[in-house]
Image: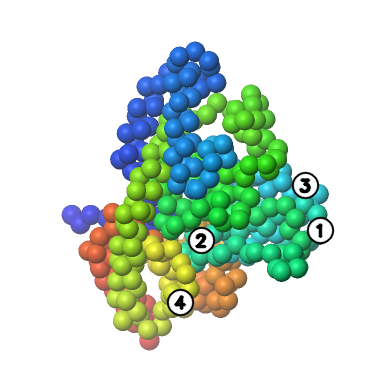
Amino acid sequence: MTSRVYLDWNATAPLRDEARDAMVAALDVVGNPSSVHQEGRAAKAVIERARGDVASLVGCKPSEVVFTSGATEAAGVLESVAGHGAVMVDDTAHDALWSHFDLTHIESGNNVLAMGLANSETGVITEPPSQNSDGHWPYGAYFAASILLDVTQAVGRIPWSFHWSGAHLAILSAHKLGGPKGVGALIVRDGLDINALQSGGGQELGRRSGTENVAGIAGFGAACRAAEHDLNAGVWDEVEKLRNILENVLASEAKETIFVGKDVPRLPNTSCFATANWKGETQVMQMDLAGFAVSSGSACSSGKVKTPRVLRAMGLRDQLAEGALRGSLGPTTTEEDVTRFAEAWLAQLKKVRARAA
């Protein structure tokens, strides 16, 4: 029986062995990390080691790391820092940022610009804006307070540092790095005051109450250590070569297909390709039956009938936007994997062409 091929790393990365081992070990740590006795201190030590590992990968101070249940919860900080100002969210940002705020009313004051560093659907990388020479921000506003970056897809795959980015806040999730689902972090630049993400016992220096998920955080930290090693070792350069092989094979046979973001900076593992008059969700089902896991958009929108907002914001006409498919690769992807996928996808495309003839 032919094994399945997983090409949906942007939805979630397979759990790393290092993360699994760290979680199993942490499950045997009995104490509550808020307790002052020896068992409590042992649990606290697990958390603080992981905090340092996250900080090392992200390029910030350990004190700037706030553990959360994931990037979506961390995005709730926007309501805190905006105050009486406004939040402006980039058109191509993830729904965790985009769907909760008024994008049209921008006023002077304590305003926030929220954007994704790398788009989950296309892999396209967007540089944060900088102030003009007159001290004004672009977008017709004075962003006096904050820039929030969603680095969920980018961190660990491309070089990036919170401190040199100019951002005031950043959000990420462990499961995109090969850590467990249900844990993530908010990065808060020193000196920036935020309201607590949730109230209670005052954990995480009062910024996110609730007993910490020790095992999950341990897995997060271990995944960050492994991800930093992979990045420094050039692992993602090899992934990019496989992505390019995939696109070259598809492009040689599918002249009507376009590759979104092919000529601009993008993540090394992501290929978003669109074919008019062939629904993306139909392609996902066909590929699933053929033994391949791919996506037609953000996993957080799965099961919903949605317009392809991101692709339309990038200028794709409806027939192309609705025919988009995303393949996202990782360090364990092989050349055989991408070749098998390309052959299966092209076989389906021939059937689509035959029906349209």
Is residue 347 something that shows in the picture?
yes
Question: Which amino acid type is shown beneath numbered disc 3?
Answer: Gly
Callout 2 crowding tier (Cα within 10 Å): few <14, some 14–19, many ≥20: many
> On the rendered image, what quadrant is the N terminus found in?
bottom left
Callout 3 crowding tier (Cα within 10 Å): few <14, some 14–19, many ≥20: some
Q: Earlier in the sequence, mark 4 or mark 2?
A: 2
Give the percent coordinates (x, y) of residue 221: 42, 38
Residue at the location (47% across, 69% down)?
A: 265
Q: Mark 1 to mark 4: distance in Å? A: 36 Å
Going by the picture, which residue comes out furthest to the bottom?
357
Give the percent coordinates (x, y) of residue 312: 58, 72
Q: Which residue is mark 3?
A: 83
Q: Which mark is residue 263?
A: 4
Question: Which amino acid type is shown beneath numbered disc 2?
Answer: Ala
Q: Which residue is mark 1?
A: 108
Instruction: Kindly check if marks 2 and 3 are in contact, taking CB atoms under 8 A apart as contact.
Output: no
Residue at the location (58% across, 40% down)?
A: 64
Q: Mark 3 to mark 1: distance in Å? A: 12 Å
Instruction: Kindly check if marks 3 and 1 are in contact, taking CB atoms under 8 A apart as contact.
Output: no
In the image, residue 190 sits, relative to residue 205, either above or below, namely below
Circle 4 — which element? Answer: loop
Q: Mark 2 to mark 3: distance in Å? A: 27 Å
Circle 3 — which element? Answer: loop
Give the percent coordinates (x, y) of residue 316: 55, 76
Give the percent coordinates (x, y) of residue 129: 63, 64
Q: Which residue is mark 2?
A: 118
Question: Which amino acid type is shown beneath numbered disc 1?
Answer: Ser
Residue at the location (67% across, 41% down)?
A: 191
Q: Earlier in the sequence, mark 1 or mark 2?
A: 1
Quick one: 124 or 51, which is closer to the camera? 51
Quick one: 336 or 308, which is closer to the camera? 336
Q: Earlier in the sequence, mark 3 or mark 1?
A: 3
